[in-house]
Each structure stands twice: as structure tokens, then as C-alpha cells.
Image (cartoon, coloured by chain):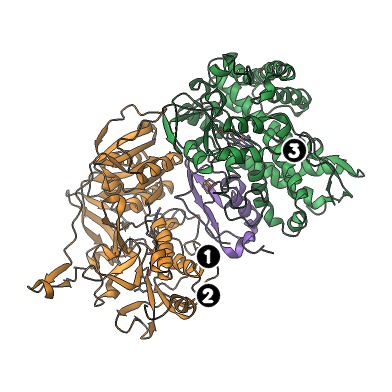
Amino acid sequence: MITRSLDAFKANGQIVIVGASLAGLRGAEALRDEGFGGRLTIIGDEPHAPYDRPPLSKQVLEGWVKADRTKLPHRREIDADWRLGVAATGLDRTKKLVRLGDGTEVPFDRLLITTGVRARQWPNPAEAGLEGVFTVRTCDDAARLQAALAARPRRVLIIGAGYIGSEMASVCRKLGLDVTVAERAAAPLAGALGNVIGAIAAEMQRDAGVDLRTGVSVSALEGDSRGHVCRAHLSDGTRLDVDLVLASLGSIRNVEWLDGARLAAGYWGLGCDAGCRVFDVHGVVTDDIFVAGDVARSPHVLFGYQFLSMEHWDNAVLGAAVAAHNMVCEELDRRAHLLVPTNWSGQFGVNIKSVGVPSFGDEIAFTQGAVTERRFAAAYGRNGRIVGAVTFNQGKWLQHYEALIMRSSPFPPPPAGFDVPADARSVPADFPPRGVGAPDVILTGHDPNERQAELVQPPR
Amino acid sequence: MRIVIDLNKCLGYAQCVPLAPEVLKLSGEEAVMYDPNPDDTQRLRVLRAVASCPVQAILLDYRDDPGKTTKP
Amino acid sequence: MTPEQAFAEAMKFENRPNPYPFFDELRKTPVARTAHGIYVVTGYKEIIALAHDPRVSSDLRNGSLLAMIRGGDSSGAPSDADSGMAEMLDKYGGDTMMILSDPPDHSRMRRQAMRHFGPPHCPDLIPSMEEYSVRIVNDLLDKLKGKHRFDVVDDYAYPLPVAVICKILGVPVEDEKQFHVWIAEFLGGMDLGPEAATEEGKRRQAKGRESRTELTKYLIGLIERAEKKGGEGMIAQLVHDTGPDGRMSSSEILQNCILLLVAGHDSTVNLLAHCVLTLLRNPGSIDKLRKRPELIPRAIEEVLRLESSVQFFPSRSALSDIEIAGTTIPSGAPIFLMYTAGNRDPAQFPDPNTFSLERDAKESLGWGAGVHTCFGGPLARLEVNVGLETFLRRVRNPRLVVDPPPYRPSQIFRGPLHCEIEIDGIEDRGAS
Ligand SMILES: Cc1cc2nc3c(=O)[nH]c(=O)nc-3n(C[C@H](O)[C@H](O)[C@H](O)COP(=O)(O)OP(=O)(O)OC[C@H]3O[C@@H](n4cnc5c(N)ncnc54)[C@H](O)[C@@H]3O)c2cc1C
Ligand code: HEM
Ligand code: SF4
């Protein structure tokens, strides 16, 4: 890059985006907004034009909106070469080109990686292959699952009660279907919001008629003679007759295509600096490779410079804008992706919104409203600072907490003047211990000058 | 038409919902649900709803957005 | 000019047609202490922050505004200025209306009222008013056929929202002649400006108090009738409410019905009249909207940004010391969130005084912000859309007769008293 002026690059350069979904689309638009007039190629392995995923677990499964009708609006004209339905299979950093599954190669001056994540499948492949066992990440997944739900299964089993599993349970109840939710942790949403809030979510599920089983895992799925799932075995010894299983086990980062490229890619995603510039395996920043969206992992000033992966919609939108800006600007104009993450989820008639990183906190205090009515706000703290907040049907107050988090204000926050909860003391937020992924990098070489990092292929 | 609602921004006051009731619905007290690719017959109603949002959370495809094509 | 002087000027009746230079002056101190210890907020950012701050109350009983005003502060200006508001609380005691309350009462009342007005429980009511509104405005224009001059306020903007809110509440529209006068006098008596202290001002306040009493008596009559006989409309539904939150107390029903009747038409009249006024002041915009009616919804929001129907609502006060924009608002101090000034804050709206259909920044404060964001916004927008579309389609070559037109006295609810226009005629209804 040093040899070419920025203007020349902006006029005639080549940018490739791998991953044609939310972050890829918004990144492409932002590049054009920023005045990039060169060649833009967008590679996506799904055959579909970019579409929005959040509706898939909500209005689509309810049957209101067809799965192929969540196409994302474009903010502007992009003028790109779209290569849809073909996967990137390799990255050659020396020759600066991306290899595609159809054997072709696409050269780039700069690369934006937005390959996101995919759904973690049920770990036993034979059982995962049974008819009636689903995951949901793509619109094709959602179309199949919606059809199966519309056929009115007698009992649905949802494995995992994170946001998506819980939303699915809500949809099943709305459709009048019997549903069992099996969650290994003590409560739904515990990983994202802790057990104190999880306990409230659990109550919501049970009140809505969900057969919620916490502290258990599913040990095996059984098929009938036609190869259709018919039974599930739980870790507590119970057996359950089911004819639809949704595995909602979290996600796997789409980084395999980067194998051999010696980038900081692994189990937790693709590491980058706060300006979306990708790190190589040593933690040294690269010049021409950028990343945004679910696959990215970057340090955040507000949260002790910890590397955060934020699998949220706004992280994809805002991260893509920052990455695009930094791809085509002078060094002094670079921006940082300093998002205060936010998330929403609609379930059981309650709008759950969060801001900041609740799981970074260790204490929680209810600050407004009444838990019994499922209308409240709560703040999360760590070391006397507010780091996150959650609201249940009180979203209009959230921006107040966002402002407090941005200023690293004291925790607990100054008391509200009205609608103060009966018990506003802070208590441990009670997050389940964080699962540690297999270490995926080791150092080789004895002399510090020769020391090299080697990636260890994690079990996949 | 294509729309997407930034539900992080959305405050759920449903200023938009009654203006395009076929396209936007309130699920519970403050969660908005919508049809992301509504039929063209809903055009005027969707434009009213988009304009009504006090935090401009509803993004309209530029090809559907009269404001994007009106520059003199 | 000190902030105190600038605020007094902005409130003066003679400056009602154009208070904006004084708001620009005030905005140099986005949160400014003015007479009587009132904190006037004119910066967009600061208004947004305070509107979402759970230490800012809308319950007048928490602020010192009333005490201060009633105490007859000797520094001159508004001695008994807010008598209209004082009345609301003193005479009918007990409970108050949603706009003057805080959560959890506020959210409960809002849910109870919304249950009979909008989604999720009543998603069809507002949409069902479209056809009715179209009929009303077409009838109004039919009556003006053959005329070459009419008053946009009295002959067009006013009758539409009154008819609609009467239908929704179950108020007999024939009674409009009575309550029209009461409401005008009651709002006219709520004076927060320097004129409140004059003889004329005092007379208006007295009149306002009487009219408010009449209006209250009238609504009590309707509520009692609904109690005995049931009937159509929100008043009856509130009286016989069996929803999950139960029924509002009788004084809450009364107060909220007054609110819905007044707020349910007054600001809509101002907005529709300001739409016509603003379009006529901006040559070319009428033609543009006629050719491209899909721009009408955003034109309406842009008019409201420029000409806020509700300039502010003087209910807020601080429940603890609040630091903002380098100032500390002390606990108990009244706070005026000046939506009208925030809407022309150049930091938020570049070139703020220009009417522009292409503006990117559209997040106006015209409907308020935070939990008190307008309850009736969707209905008002539907009416104004229908009103403006039909006006543009049927009124041939409209021209302003006087500019600026005469304004109504209220500082809070700002709008033209009349808006005379000359026209070449009225088109037939056409297909629709
Ligand atoms: C059912 C569901 C509900 C959700 N609900 C919410 C919600 O309520 N709130 C919220 O904030 N977020 C929600 N999310 C998350 C949100 O959708 C994601 O944060 C967002 O989609 C991330 O966008 P992205 O572009 O980074 O990644 P993705 O959307 O995952 O896109 C990555 C794209 O890259 C493609 N790709 C991968 N590898 C390759 C390759 N080698 N070559 C070419 N293409 C490749 C993928 O197929 C995919 O199309 C939800 C997600 C799902 C699935
Ligand atoms: C153009 C028309 C209108 C405008 C500009 C407008 C503006 C506003 C504003 C700015 C507020 C906030 C007041 C505050 O800060 O406390 C408000 C509140 C309110 N409005 Fe409107 N309004 C309009 C029409 C209507 C209609 C048609 C109705 C009724 C059907 C209505 C009912 C209310 C109610 C009940 C409140 C109080 C809400 C609460 O406290 O939660 N308004 N309005
Ligand atoms: S008007 Fe905007 S903020 Fe309100 S519900 Fe609709 S999208 Fe959400």
C-alpha cells in the first residue's frame, strides 16, 4: 500500500469481500460511501442475496413471513461483482488472492472478511442426520423448520435455551405446540444475562406452558424405522417422545477457509484490532486484511481491553462501517469500532433488551420497575463500575444506561426518582462458569528471536 | 419493497404500527414484528410508517425511498 | 441578551409567529437557569438525555413550579400564571392524568388507555379512521366550492380532528360548539409569559379557570352517563374496563379524558395549518408534493420539526441533583424541555431553518421523547396525511393572504389562530 497513493487505490484498487450477508452488504455500501471507486467483488457461499436473520426465529417460524422474504434493503447502489453460491476455500497472503470452490481465484489489494458463524450441529452425526432434527441459521434452515412446525409435531424438543432457543420455544407455544426445553445451565439465557435474570426467564417459559428442564443435557437422540427422530434421552435418565428436535447449541466461526493463512483465526473467531485490522497468528496487525461481524473478535476499551466477539446485529452493521472506512482512509483518519453492544429479543410477549456486556459484570442490581410484572430494568457492575444493563419491557429507559456505561459510571447507578424496585440491592449476577475452548495456539522454538506461534487445529 | 427495523434503536412506542398495520405488528407491549419484504400495494402505508419513526429505526431500500431520488 | 431575557422574549405573544431567534440565543447555554429557577433546555442532545433520565419527573406535585407560581414570586412576571395547571390538581384532587404522572402509575394509565386505542389490543381502531377522515375532509371541501377565499384553520384543519376524537371517545360532536370555546379559553389562560401579569392576562386566566370548570363538569356528565348506560367509545370503555390492569380510578378517568379530548385535536389542528402555511411559504414545494405524493409523510414530519405544535410541556422537574452540560440542575427545580428549540439545533439539524424534503436527520422532537412520547401520534399523522393529501389534490392554486398569520396566545400549544388563503377553486372529489 505504501507504494501506491491512497487516491490511486480508491480509484482503481481491488477490494474483495468474503461473506455476503449483513456485514458484507453494509461493508460494501460503506466502501462506496467512502468514495471507493475501484473494483469490488463480493463472495458468498449461500445462493441468496443478503437477507436478515433475526426474523427467522420469530415472524418466519410463526408462519407470518415466508423464509425467502427477509431480503435486506440496500442503503445505496453498490456496483459490485456478486459471486453468490460459491465458497471461498483459501487465502493466499503472498499472492494476495482468494481461492474459490469453483477453482477460480480473485486477486485483491484489500480484503474484508465477513464470513460470520454457522449453527453448531448436534455432535453425533448419525443422530444429527435423523429426519426431524434441525438447527436454524440460514433461510433454508428456517423454511424447512417452519414447514415441519406447520405440520404440527406432537412434541418439540429444544436443546439449549439461549436467545434463539428461547425465542423458538415462545413461537412453539404461540402455535399451540407442546414443547420441552432442555438446558444444561441452571436457567435460560444464563450465559448472556446470568442466573438472576435467567430465573425470571425460566418463570416466563413455565408460565407460558413450556416444559422447561434445566440442569440436564440431552445425551442421545433415537430414530424410528423410517429414520425420523422419535425419542430423546436426557442426562437425568428420563426419556422423552418427541418428533421434532431443534439443536440450539450456539455457533461455530466460519474460519476454516483461512487455514494456512497464518492469521489469528480460531475457536473464538478472527482476532483484530479495534480498527477491524486482522492480526496474524503472532498478534501482529496486518495492513490489508479487515474483518467485521459475527466472525470478528476485537479488544474493547470499556471492557478492560478484553477481546470480545459480539454476535449481534448492530456489531455487524457498525463494525462493517468502521472496517470499510479504515480500508480506504489515511492512517490519521482511522476510526475505532467502539460499539457499546446492544441486543434485543422478543419472547413470550416480553421485549428483552440489553446494552453493554452484562456477562462482563459480576453483580446485578434491579434499578427500575417490578420483576413480578416482568417490567423492569437492571444494571450489571464490575469493580464498582456499570458495564451492562438489561430491560424487560422497559426499553425506553435503555439509553439512559447506555450513557452511564459509556462514561464508566459508578455501580450501582444513582437511584431512579420513581418506580424504584422493592429490592434494589446489588447481588451476584451468577453467570455460569465460562466454557474454555481448547487452546488453539502453541509457541515453538527456544530462542526468543526464533519463537513462532503455531495454530493447533481445534476439534471440529 | 424491502425494509429492516433496527430493533436496537427502536423504542417500541409503536408510532409506526397503526400506519401500516399489515406490515408492522406489536407483539406484547413493546416488541415490534414486521414483514421485511412487504407487497408493493402497501407502499404508501409503509412510507407513512417510515416517516413516523421518531428515532428513524426503519430503513427503506434506497430504490423504495422517495427521499433518495428527489434531489433536484 | 441573558438567557432570562431571551426566554421572556420567546414567550412573549408578539413573538409567537417567530420565536426562533430567541431560542437560538438561549441555545448558547443549552441548559440555562432562568426566572423563578426554571431550567430551560434548548439543546437537542440535552433534551434527549433528560427525557430519558429516570430522575426527571413529570408529576407537577414534585416540582416547585406550582409553589413558585402560586407563591406570587415578587420578581414581577407570571404571578398566577399557571393557574390552569394548579386547578387541575387542586380542584379535582386525588389522581392525575398520564402526562402529569410518573411510572408506575404513568405506565399503567398509558396501558389502560392504549388498550382501547391502539395495538396490541386494539390494532384496528386507528386504521379504521382513515376512511372516516377522507369523508370528512372531502365534505369540508365540497362546502367550499364556489368560494375564492377560506380560513385553513376554521374551515379545514379544525373540524377534522375534532370529529375524529369525538367519535373515538364517544363525545357527541354536536357539543363541539360549547367545548370549543371552553378549550380555547382554558388553553389561552395557561400563560407562562410576561403578559400573564397584565390586566388583560389576569382576565384571561380567570376566564380560563371558569372554562376549565365548565369542561370538567361537562366530561363528568359524559362519564356518569357512560357509567349508567354504557355506550360506544373510549369513555365508556374506560369506565367499564375489565383489562389486566383493572379500571382507572374515577378521577384518573376524568383527567385522562380531558387530556385525550384536548390533546386529541388541538395539536393536530396546529400541525395541519402549519403544513399549509409552510408549503405556501416555500414556492415549488406544493408542485413537488402534487407530483410526488409519496413525499407527503416526510414533509409532514419536517413541518413539525420547523413548527412544533407542542413547543414544550411545563411538567418536568428534577428529583435529585442532575449534572448536565456543565450545569447542575438542583433537586426540585422545574425543567422545561424546549422541543421547539431542539428541533432547530444546528448540531443535530444542519441548516436548521430551512424546509427540506431531502433531509437525512429526521429524528425530531415534535412528538416529545421518552416515556411520555405522544400517545396519539399515529392517529394525528393519519389525519394530517389525509388532510394534506386531499388539500393538495383538490385546492386549486392556494395563496397566502397574510404572512405571518395571527397566532393563538398559548406558548405551549403554538399555532395560527386563522390562516386565510385565496384559491382558484376546488376540484371535484375524483375517483377516491
Ligand atoms: C435465527 C437468528 C436470530 C437472530 N436474532 C438476533 C436478534 O434478535 N438480535 C441480534 O442482535 N442478533 C440476532 N441474530 C444475529 C445476527 O443475525 C448476526 O449477528 C448477523 O447475521 C451477523 O452478520 P454477519 O454478516 O457478520 O454474519 P452472517 O450473517 O453469519 O453471514 C456470514 C455469511 O458468510 C457466508 N460464508 C461463510 N463462510 C464463507 C466462505 N468461506 N465463503 C463464502 N461465504 C461464506 C455465510 O454463509 C453467510 O452467508 C440472530 C441470528 C439468527 C441466526
Ligand atoms: C400533531 C399532533 C400532535 C402533536 C404534535 C403532539 C405532541 C405531543 C407531545 C410533544 C407530547 C409530549 C408531552 C410531554 O413531553 O410530556 C404529547 C403527549 C401526549 N399526546 Fe400528543 N400530540 C399530537 C396529537 C395527539 C393526539 C391526536 C392525541 C390523542 C388521541 C394525543 C394525546 C397525547 C397524550 C395522551 C399525551 C401524553 C402521553 C404520556 O404522558 O404518556 N396527542 N403529544
Ligand atoms: S416508530 Fe420506530 S421506535 Fe417506534 S415502534 Fe416503530 S420502529 Fe420502533
Q: From the top left corner, tell me how far across and down residue C415 is, in percent.
A: 71, 36
Label of residue C160 in the image: 3
Which chain has been coloured green in this picture? C
Relative vertical location of residue C337 with respect to residue A405 in this rendering, above or below:
above
Tell me the subunit letter for badge 1: A
Residue sitting at 57 percent across and 28 percent down? C314
**Residue B6 point in image, percent of width and height:** 48, 53
Kind of residue indicated by mark 2: Asp
Q: Nearer the viewer, residue A294 or A360?
A: A360
Task: Compute the Cα span from label 1 to label 2.
Answer: 12 Å
Q: Nearer the viewer, residue C148 or A383?
A: A383
Please tell me in which quadrant of the rendered image residue A289 appears.
Answer: bottom left
Colour-to-chain, purple: B
Judging by colour alone, the chain drawn in orange in this rendered image is: A
Q: Residues within 10 Å of mark 3 (few under 14, many from 20)?
A: many
Residue C59, image x and y in percent? 51, 24
Would residue C430 appear left or right of C43 to someone viewing this image? right
